[in-house]
Image (tube, grey):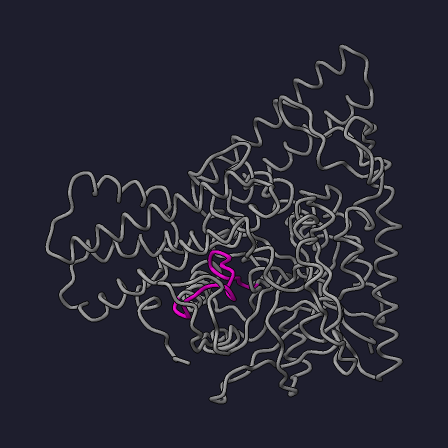
Amino acid sequence: MAKGYFAFVLHNHLPYVLAHGRWPHGMDWLSEAAGETYMQLLRVMWEMIEQGYKPKLTVDISPVLCEQLADHTFKDEFTTYLTQKIEAAEKDIVEFEKYKQPNMLANAKMWVEFYSKTLKSFNDINQDIIAQMRKLQDDGYLEIMTCGATHGYMPLLSRDETVQAQVKAAVKNYEKHFGRKPRGIWLPECAYRPRYAWSPPLPIDGSQDAYSRKGVDEFLSENGIDYFIVDSHLLKGGRSIGVYLDRFEALKRLWGQFEKEYKPREEDTAKTPREVYLVSSAVEGKKPTAIFTRDPDTGLLVWSGEHGYPGDGNYLDFHKKRFPGGNRYWAVTSAKSDLADKVEYNAKSAMSRLPENSDHFVGKIQEIIDAYHAESGREGILTAPFDAELFGHWWFEGPDFLKQVIMKIHDNPDVDLTFLSEHLNRVQPTDVISIPEGSWGEGGHHYIWLNQDNEWTWKYIYAAEKKMCELARHYTANKNTIGGELVDVMKQAARELMLLVASDWQFLISTWAARDYAELRLSEHYADFKRLAEIVDRMIGGARMSDGDREFYNDCCQRDTLFSEIELEWFARVEYPA
């Protein structure tokens, strides 16, 4: 009998970038993530299966990412991207041979091999990453969760209809791509809000009066979602530790403005991340939703670029790149070293660090599971959720670290690998608890997504939410007489709203990672939504679409071509009102 269970969980998400730029911000993000993370996760899964292992990895793939990976535009773009990376490395080879730089030459040859193998694998799977993920799930090696449709930050959205649409679109999209209903969901930014009388943080039509809002858990329950993941401070209080402060200097400065106002909840020692609980904020007796809790002790071992494994000086440095081409040839060296001080990367030295790091990680898992079993006599679970891009994109050697950890846990008689839904079936929790509003961010609240730098974005989001609900209600009241073209324009307006509310824009503004791009994208989606709504209003009034309006509408459809399954009813009324 195992003493406990371990679940590796990877969150896969990128905002919609198709037809919205390439470099430095845009489609190259998607190509980088596909080449360095998604294809490498498939690689290590295939390798483990070939070696006789049953990996049992839990992942979520956000619906907006599913739509992009399935789009022919991405497939063509990714092929071109990989070819360019190979050609850049081949040019580097010529230079390094000329200047007698043997280690740099070896690295350039490594990149040729890496990208060539990735391109071959991509073509071997018929350029269909989603189909391979689906097959791994169907074969029992992978559990795939869903996510909010466009990663909207649910606690700050002003309309329950918008939250409902994020969940309903996620379920519909999952069925389209994976042929079944999802059991679990990754709440965007792990952000949760219970039911209560909510006051908007910014005035809506001049008012900040409170009004009744449903809890996020209610939308999950109503749509058949069985579980979601929370940060440990939402379960038991104590200090919330954000995972991005090490990576973004702007977040450190921003946190400094809020830190003095932050008072951690008193820690509830009766609750533990080792157990699964049920959460409900409804009063009508709806089925509660289970929560799994992020383990705080193992998280920083992988998340932290300064104190965690990715900060090992032998590993490939993420920041320093060689141009033209953008390939990386230097090692981390030390967490504090400047780019000019980085030493040349040595792949053999880097890979030699993985056994020790994976042994340490597995040892920590064993230690935590053993301690809980000895204390309680129960078989607890350690849930270790991470952004998937950490493995491969930010930490190049990360996929092979993940592979070694999974194989070592697989061979460990005291700890069993598990899917989250499998563990939920196993323990069948009965304890129903309440958890507070919050997210994964430092301090556990909303300051990353609502601060003086990005609060202006919510003014536009709130206005668009209100207008979309008005249009959708008109549709449901007159659906028998409304023509198909008008419905199509309404649905495109709904798509623009979905893209407008993506939490990525506020995050990128706060971190300064791609601030100009994020501000432009949000402004463009709002402008597109507003003009489409004006077209709808004119058509409702009896006017025909002008040639200019038709060209604009067609351009929107070609540029933002996602969620064919979208339904206007989602925005018209809340299915089970508060």
Residue drawn 52% across the image and 30% down it: 80
Magenta residues (range): 145-161
Tell me: residue 113, above or below residue 530.
above
Residue 474 versus residue 568: which sits nearer the camera? 474
The C terminus: image quadrant: bottom left
The N terminus: image quadrant: bottom right
Residue 370 position, x and y percent, is: 87, 73
Tell me: residue 55, above or below residue 369.
above
Residue 98 versus residue 25: which sits nearer the camera? 25
Residue 569 versus residue 115: which sits nearer the camera? 569
Q: For residue 146: magenta? A: yes
Q: Number of numbered discs present?
A: 0
Q: Quadrant of residue 409?
A: bottom right
Residue 66 position, x and y percent, is: 49, 53
Residue drawn 68% across the image and 34% down it: 114
Residue drawn 84% across the image and 84% down it: 377
Tell me: residue 168, above or below residue 114.
below
Report whether 281 appears left or right of 44. left
Residue 291 versus residue 70: which sits nearer the camera? 291
Q: For residue 469: magenta? A: no
Report whether 460 appears left or right of 437. left
Residue 515 position, x and y percent, is: 54, 41
Residue 311 position, x and y percent, is: 81, 44
Residue drawn 53% across the image and 75% down it: 217
Q: Quadrant of residue 190?
A: bottom right
Report whether 198 appears left or right of 400. left
